[in-house]
Image: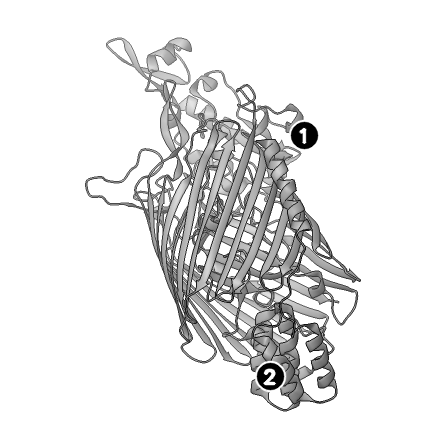
Amino acid sequence: MKRVIYMLSVLMLLLAILVTGEVRAQENCGEFKITEAQRRYTNGNFQDVFALLNPCLENGFTTNEKAVAYKLIAQSYLAVDSLEGATISIRQMLLANPSYEPDGDLSVSTKFARIVNFLKNATDRVIQVSSVSKKLEDINKAPATVMVLTAEDIVQRGYIDMEALFNDLPGFDVSRTYGSTYSNIYQRGYRSSNTDRTLFMINGIEENDFWGNFVYWNRQFPITNVSRIEIVYGPASTMYGANAFLGVVNVITKQPTDVIRNNKNFGMKADLGYGSYKTRYADVTTGAKFKNIVFSLTGRAYFSREHDLSKYEEYNFNPDYYDKVNYKKILSVTSNAATFVKVNKIGDDNAYYSLTKVNGEVTAANLTDQGETVARNMDKAALKGNLNGNPIGYSNLLEHYYIKGSLKVSDFTLGFQNWQNIQGSLNYSNDNSRAGSSNGNIWEPRQSLYYVVYEKEIIPDKLAIINTAQYRTTQINDQSRIVTVRNYSNKGLTPTNLLNNKQPFWRTQFYYQQSQQYRDELKILYTPSPRLDIVGGIEIRNSLIQGDYKKYTIDSTLVADYYISATERGKSDFDTVSGGNLFEHRNIGAYAQGTFEASKALRITLGGRFDHNRIRKTGGYGNQFNPRMAVVYAPGRFVVKAIYAQAFQDASSRDRYSTSAPTRLIANPGLRPEQVNNFEVSFNFAPMKGARLDVSAYYAIYKDIIEEITVPYKNGVTLQKNNTGKSYVTGVQAVFDYKISKNFNLFSNYTFTDAKKDSIAGTVVTDVVTNKKLIVGDIAKHHFNVGVNGVFLKSEKLNINLRFNYVSGRRVGRGTSVPLNPQPNGLFPAYKIFNTAITYTISNAIQVQAIVNNILNEKYSDPGIRSANGIDQAYRTPQKGTNAMLRVLLNF
């Protein structure tokens, strides 16, 4: 099978390169017409320009030729003082070439450039997206609910990283931990252990980690090279296969020529910042061109100490905390007490335990006052002194590094991307479980990507092929460490340990994981007629994915900093299992989607994808088929969409094979994929000039949800990943954008989410008598976001952006899917925050920006992730108060 996959890959690439024959049927139209029209325009014969070009715009020009023709026609309209005609033509030009920028085009007038910029900023502009159907299409006609953030939005709103934007988007709940993955971001009411059910891509290339499907939406991704970000809501397996379960976020980066200005051969964009918590970063993108070769290089470095949580009880490492602990409850033995007493040879005169007897039989061994004092004092002593080279205390180091390069030669694009995060993980837990980053508690994910893209238009405007070959690795660097305290209060040490006067200690575990994948996709775009377009493709993936972490454990407090390679010395529970700890995955997928224009107002889309997966010889999910059906009705000023889609989420290697002592001791290689059926209706309307209202309502049914449940294990129980019950989510998203005037824009959105579940991990299940479902924890029922952007001064050099976020209360605890969260009253209260970004343009090359987040210093916390039990998993993360950033934007 492996040989077949590689042979298919090579054949696909050769086919993509060799098929280069072109069929050109437009004998009377083409570049010669445009050349002649350009000559007539130069001579002032503007009516001749209209006569030459208009007949060819119907079906004689290619898309690129149409863009040039509409540009010439618009210039001619301006020459005869027809502003309306010029505006209509420029709008058509932007439909043919959405990426056109007038800044470096010396052939157009200032008035032409103003119209282009106005239309690009107008609310009723035509926006094209590529993430729904893997081809450019009008956002209003795409068979899904989509939002787009432009590079201008990102700068104006003061986003300095990718993660920041999700608080302003509809359909997302954010639990920001500032830990290993920085945030858990839940789309459309689906809470999961990690951000692993939304597909994240850069230019259509996936970023999710192979081992756990994680998205590391941390601070490493650059801003300077972003052209736009497309957010697709709802299942997308029809085009992307497994793991596009809840939606897709696709970052479209700038072309090298977008960075180069004023007909130069080199350009640079830089974004530099310094702010609260000793945060500083540099983000630089450069572009260069030489003849038919264009090159770009992007680099980013980001450093921060993050906000200090030591003022909160669960993070202050204060020994006085143990004065409140009931050690007698923790360390007294009431189950199998007689055995405990016999094995440890406890007499009636033992200083640490007093015995309770019934008819001469020991029924309990109760911790004495002296025993409690000894246990408490030993736990206190463990918080003193040095650990891994520094005094024990709160710390949360954050360092990120990123580099990306691309080289385009003719129809080929070659590129690479590498990034590394260095991040503390204490915030996943608390000070009675984990140490701070300065004490060695560091997580270091890395990813590397190398790719080649071949694009060729075989028949202009009718047939094109795109082949993408890539090799990617995702890993946890072997310097990753989790440092945990083993003491009496957290049950890391036992009553037997106390009898032996064992001192609490800090355990250091080194981790390593690396997985790799070769992938090739051949995509075909075919438009046999103006009323029908088809996109289809085939892709293969051959992956080698680690089953469980390799770990090396040191069960003693390391006073000085110490490193040992988990790559060389680490072991896994699967090392002794047949086949070992590396699992070969083979995937083949084929997809097709067609859109038929039944009338000028009615479009029908049908699509489907078949996926086949094998792990080694007999594992994997086998076969999956997922369809999409959509009807789009757009008779005029409004658009109505009806959409049905299915998707599946494959169980990750982490879910299948990973264990985590002492809580999860059994793997489950036989997990089935999760499934979703999504029904959606959306309405898009322009209620007034410059305004746009989008409303989407959906109902999603999720089944075979993968969760941890309690199962028998030896003489007791343990946790294991299993397919459990169903989840039902009803939601509404509304977006209203309004261009109030030339200098003022408003954006707003509202989200309603009602998420329920049939069952839950552990022993708490739905009441089958009343059929009362559980509330999905951590999900707010209501979100409201609104922002205003204004341009001031006669020179229009001052831009002020003000944003407001409201999040309603989030339920946890009893009656929810997070029953162990001890948050008082089972509710994280609603909160509201204001953020602002003030930008001043010094020159065309320099802008300065002041960013202030949480202006009113609102005090609030996000719910904890995973079990959020408040013991080994934090039940909350207090969020940042007022914080600021000074930013400098350079464009040369």
Which quarter of the image is occupied by the N terminus?
Answer: top right
The residue under label 2 is 86
833 on left or right of 32: left
The residue under label 1 is 563
Which quarter of the image is occupied by the C terminus?
Answer: bottom right
- Secondary structure under tag 2 reads helix
> Which residue appears at 72% of the width and 85% of the height?
40
- Secondary structure under tag 1 reads loop
Chain-order first, disc 1 or disc 2: 2
Relative to 19, does residue 325 appear above or below in the rendering?
above
What residue type is disc 2 on?
Ala
10 Å neighbourhood of mark 2: few (<14), some, or many (≥20)?
many
Q: Which of 384 and 477 is in front in this view?
A: 477
How far from the left and from the top, in percent, is residue 399? Answer: 65, 47
How far from the left and from the top, in percent, is residue 197? Answer: 47, 46
Distance between the Cα atoms at labels 1 and 2? 67 Å
Q: Which residue lies furthest to the bottom in this view?
A: 80
What residue type is disc 1 on?
Tyr
How far from the left and from the top, in percent, is residue 685? Answer: 40, 72
Q: Which of 282 and 737 is in front in this view?
A: 737
- Count of marks, rendered view: 2
Q: Can residue 31 be seen in this view?
A: yes
